[in-house]
Image (cartoon, grey):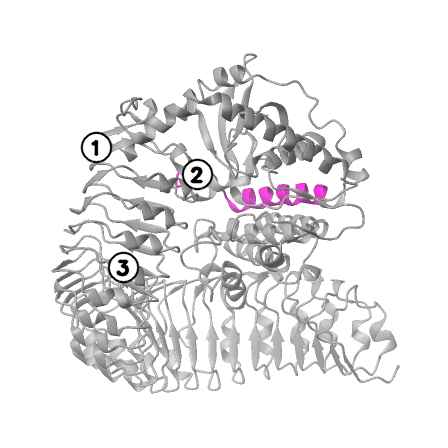
């Protein structure tokens, strides 16, 4: 073995650390590859210099920590050094300059700090330099731009500052790719960059470059990808054409052009039509571009994405755009375009998104829009469109979103609206629609947003609306609707916003389901609605006035027979439950011997504590009931969870919460104080959490959590799960982890709550079956498909929630579909740029701790992906997750202190 020259152990599942005496044993080793394993600990240093023949050292994608050994400089034969995607800290050793034969220096995705050593410029044979996604600061040594052999320079996602040297590119004849995005570089882009004539990729986005975009970029004849998004670049004057864009006509291989979010203030040149026939993507939104869109743009026949939104463009939409047969995304919203929508756009057979909202377009909608069979998103809002909606539009079977709001569209909604069977959002508010609402709209089971407000719709709200089972937002205000609010709407459990104000509705307001939570603003200015006093409408009178009221009265007149039957059913149910409980395992029986022995509190006490369960004390609603704030007679503030006894599973839910919350004690579990239980009322009295839920802090605009607070909260949640999964005789599975079930006390300490669907694993059980489903979006694959529940199902839900907390995107967000989930979105970001998915409130490019936060979040999202593996066996457990999160926090604080 001592004469071994090649040791290749890459892409396995090795763990532990590298032996300290590795080079002492293998003194003739030339190639050492242990990439993509689980090795950890420091890289051996004191014996490393004994591998004097080593020319390839590849430790990519492990968990090595500590510093890069200074002895690395004694490996004078080293040709390839790859230590990327580890946890290395400290500075890049200057002794690396002694590796004079080095061609590949690959150190991305670590925690390296300090400045880039100027000595790297002495590596005359260097071809690949990658130091991206670290915490590097200072200026880029100008000596690096003198290494003539360089093919690739990758320095993105650091905190590098200063200007590029005025001679950049002059001594880089072989450079093909230059990545400097997400740093703090400023000053102009030197025209000398055009001397790097082999350049194919130039990515300068998310910096502070300023000045005029150099027209010399057009000399880069091999350029394929050009990106300088989010800088401060301009043209010569607001009345001049964008000369740099005209110069890019020389770049015959150009595919991607990203210039968004710059104050360019120029005109689109007619030469835009002469850009590369290979051009596929143009992003030029938020650039203050003025003037009209040249008709020559239609020559870009291979364009897939064209985004000129939120500029100051005027004039008509060119008819020549109909020639762009490969176009999938056309975004021109937020401009000042005039004229009608050209029917030539109907020729774009591959168009998936058409956004023309916020312009001054007028005229009718063309019936030929039905030719756009690939269309998924249509936004024509806030224009001056007239006439009616063509019947053919409702034949777009697979369209997901339609927004025609704020126009002058009239006519009726047809029965054919049912054809849009996968539609999720429909907004035709603020138009002149008349007639009735077609009953067929109730078949749109995936619709979550529906606004028909501010029209002239008449007659009643269809009873079929109860079929809109996914609906979250419903606005029918400011119409001429009459009749009653259908009780079928009580079945829409996800409904959060409801507005039927300013109509002619009458009769009782429904009282169940989501209607428990709507305020008086939902019903203002109607003819004869009646209901609870809190809704500021008259009380509903009993009598012959209304059949429903008669039936309601009969329920009180004829109770005797029903009571007898009910009593019999209760006795049978109680006997059955006793038999079921006797069959439970002895472990569970011993675990919960006295689950309900605390002092009971009466209904009258709770009613007094909540002022008659007044809506002003309503804190929110959970899976099986409502939660109110109350003040007991001794002055103690409590949260009172009132169970909705009309739901079938509520008895089991009440028992489950009592069992779990009364018998377990942990700092991060919600604490139960008492209970109130009778045949017609059940409630739990819990510690009051003054800071509400994690969901409130994530999605309310007047609340904010910084990166450390979010990390602390998720460590708290992980600690609670670790306690439930690993420190109990019988593991407890929460089964419904989500931000609304995480409560925050006065010190912002997190407490896991709502154990209404919790499960217990018996002795030697790894997984059990259940028919109870948790919240969509957080359910593990095996749980949703087969009803299989284990501690690893909680781990999956925790991973989804971890992604949600740092991206501020719910797994059910409208941007996600079958093809792109929150998990896939985050996974893709780790291969590109985390800043594309991270909550924008957490980091700004001017933040001095930007690099430290970026690295921290990358580690968090990586852990989240380990929690959400499709296979339960491959998921991390909560003990390891807690350890990892605490290490991530330690590194974050250490890096912030150093900056």
The residue mark sitting in front, 3 or 2, is 3
Q: Are marks 2 and 1 in contact (CB under 8 Å)?
A: no
Return the x and y of residue 458 as percentages of the image width and height.
Answer: 18, 45
Which residue position holds label 2? 703
Looking at the image, can residue 168 be seen? no
Magenta span includes 712: yes
Q: Residue furthest top?
A: 633
Image coordinates for residue 291, horizontal then vertical, percent: 15, 68
| Nearer the observer, 586 or 124 | 586
From what the image shows, is residue 50 above or below residue 464? below
Q: Nearer the viewer, mark 2 or mark 1?
A: 1
* Secondary structure of residue under mark 1: loop
Say few, some or many: other residues with alpha carbon within 10 Å of mark 2 (under 14 / 14 to 19 / 20 or more).
Answer: few
The answer to the question of whether label 3 and label 1 lie on touching residues, with beta carbons closer than 8 A, is no
Residue to which mark 3 is pinned = 417
N-terminal-most mark, 3 or 1: 3
Q: Residue at x 47, y 20 (%)?
A: 610
Question: Is 703 placed above or below 899 here?
Answer: above
Answer above or below: position of 256 versus 162.
below
Horizontally, residue 828 falls left or right of residue 345, namely right
Disc on the earlier residue, 3 or 2: 3
State how far apart marks 3 and 2 are (Cα).
39 Å
Give, as a single range, the part of the protein colored magenta: 701-724
Evaluate if marks 3 and 2 touch, with contact meaning CB atoms under 8 Å apart: no
Q: Secondary structure at mark 3?
A: helix
Disc number at residue 526? 1
| Residue shown at the point (27%, 73%) measured from the top left | 372
Q: Nearer the viewer, residue 278 or 361?
A: 361
> Is residue 460 on the magenta stretch?
no
Cα separation, mark 3 vs mark 1, equals 27 Å
């Amino acid at each position: 073995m001592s004469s071994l020259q090649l040791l290749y152990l890459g892409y396995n599942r090795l763990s532990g650390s590298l032996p300290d005496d590795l080079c002492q044993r293998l003194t003739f080793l030339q190639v050492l590859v242990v990439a993509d394993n689980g090795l950890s600990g420091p890289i051996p240093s004191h014996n490393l210099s004994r591998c004097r023949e080593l020319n390839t050292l590849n430790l990519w994608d492990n968990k090595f920590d500590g510093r890069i050994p200074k002895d690395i400089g004694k490996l004078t034969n080293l040709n390839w050094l790859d230590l990327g995607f580890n946890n290395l800290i400290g500075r890049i050793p200057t002794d690396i300059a002694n590796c004079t034969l080095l061609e590949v220096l690959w150190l991305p995705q670590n925690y390296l700090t300090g400045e880039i050593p100027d000595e790297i410029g002495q590596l005359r044979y260097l071809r690949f330099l990658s130091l991206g996604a670290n915490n590097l600061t200072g200026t880029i040594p100008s000596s690096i731009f003198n290494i003539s052999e360089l093919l690739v320079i990758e320095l993105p996602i650091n905190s590098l500052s200063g200007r590029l040297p005025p001679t950049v590119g002059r001594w880089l004849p072989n450079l093909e790719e230059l990545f400097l995005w997400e740093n703090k570089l400023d000053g102009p882009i030197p025209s000398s960059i055009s001397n790097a004539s082999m350049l194919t990729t130039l990515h300068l986005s998310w910096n502070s470059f300023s000045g005029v975009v150099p027209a010399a970029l057009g000399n880069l004849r091999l350029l394929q990808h050009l990106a300088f998004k989010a800088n401060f670049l301009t043209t010569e004057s607001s009345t001049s054409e964008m000369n740099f864009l005209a110069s890019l006509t020389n770049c015959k291989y150009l595919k991607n052009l990203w210039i968004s979010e710059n104050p360019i203030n120029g005109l689109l040149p007619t030469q835009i039509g002469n850009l590369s026939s290979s051009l596929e993507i143009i992003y030029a939104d938020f650039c203050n571009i003025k003037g009209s869109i040249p008709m020559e743009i239609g020559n870009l026949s291979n364009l897939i994405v064209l985004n000129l939104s939120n500029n100051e463009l005027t004039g008509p939409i060119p008819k020549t755009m109909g020639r762009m047969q490969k176009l999938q995304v056309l975004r021109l919203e937020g401009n000042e375009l005039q004229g009608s929508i050209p029917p030539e756009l109907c020729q774009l057979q591959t168009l998936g998104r058409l956004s023309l909202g916020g312009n001054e377009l007028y005229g009718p909608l063309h019936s030929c829009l039905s030719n756009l069979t690939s269309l998924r998103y249509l936004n024509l809002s806030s224009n001056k469109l007239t006439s009616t909606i063509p019947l053919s539009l409702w034949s777009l079977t697979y369209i997901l979103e339609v927004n025609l709001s704020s126009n002058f569209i009239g006519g009726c909604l047809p029965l054919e609206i049912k054809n849009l069977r996968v539609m999720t959002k429909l907004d035709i508010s603020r138009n002149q629609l008349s007639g009735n609402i077609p009953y067929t709209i109730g078949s749109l089971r995936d619709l979550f947003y529906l606004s028909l407000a501010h029209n002239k719709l008449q007659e009643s709200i269809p009873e079929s609306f109860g079929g809109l089972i996914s609906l979250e937002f419903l606005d029918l205000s400011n119409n001429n609707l009459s009749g009653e609010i259908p009780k079928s709407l009580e079945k829409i459990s996800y409904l959060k916003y409801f507005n039927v104000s300013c109509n002619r509705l009458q009769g009782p307001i429904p009282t169940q389901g989501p209607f428990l939570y709507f305020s008086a603003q939902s019903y203002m200015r109607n003819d004869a609605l009646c209901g609870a006093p809190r809704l500021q409408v008259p009380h509903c009178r009993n009598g012959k006035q209304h059949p429903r009221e008669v039936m309601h009265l009969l329920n009180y007149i004829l109770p005797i027979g029903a009571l007898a039957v009910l009593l019999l059913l209760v006795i049978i149910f109680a006997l059955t439950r006793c038999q079921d409980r006797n069959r439970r395992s002895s472990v569970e029986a011993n675990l919960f011997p006295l689950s309900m022995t605390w002092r009971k509190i009466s209904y009258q006490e709770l009613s007094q504590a909540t002022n008659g369960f007044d809506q002003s004390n309503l804190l929110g609603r959970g899976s099986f009931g409502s939660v109110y704030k109350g003040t007991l007679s001794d002055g103690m503030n409590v949260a009172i969870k009132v169970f909705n006894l009309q739901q079938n599973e509520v008895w089991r839910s009440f028992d489950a919460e009592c069992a779990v919350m009364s018998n377990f004690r942990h700092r991060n579990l919600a604490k139960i104080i008492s209970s109130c239980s009778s045949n017609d009322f059940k409630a739990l009295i819990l510690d009051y959490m003054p800071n509400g839920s994690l969901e409130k802090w994530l999605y309310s605009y007047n609340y904010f959590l910084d990166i450390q607070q979010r990390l602390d909260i998720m460590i708290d949640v992980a600690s609670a799960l670790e306690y439930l999964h690993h420190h109990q005789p019988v593991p407890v599975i929460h089964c419904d982890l989500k931000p609304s079930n995480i409560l925050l006390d006065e010190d912002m300490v997190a407490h896991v709550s709502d154990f209404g669907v919790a499960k217990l694993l018996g002795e030697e059980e790894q997984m059990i079956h259940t028919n109870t489903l948790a919240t969509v979006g957080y359910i593990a694959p095996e749980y949703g498909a087969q009803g299989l529940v284990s501690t690893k199902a909680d781990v999956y839900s925790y991973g989804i929630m971890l992604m949600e907390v740092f991206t501020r995107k719910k797994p059910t967000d409208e941007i996600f579909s079958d093809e792109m989930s929150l998990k896939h979105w985050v996974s893709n970001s780790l291969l590109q740029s985390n800043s594309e998915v991270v909550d924008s409130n957490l980091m700004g490019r001017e933040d001095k701790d930007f690099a430290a936060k970026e690295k921290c979040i990358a580690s968090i999202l990586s852990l989240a992906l380990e929690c959400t593996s499709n296979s339960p066996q491959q998921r991390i457990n909560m003990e390891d997750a807690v350890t990892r999160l605490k290490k991530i926090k330690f590194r974050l604080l250490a890096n912030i202190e150093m900056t």
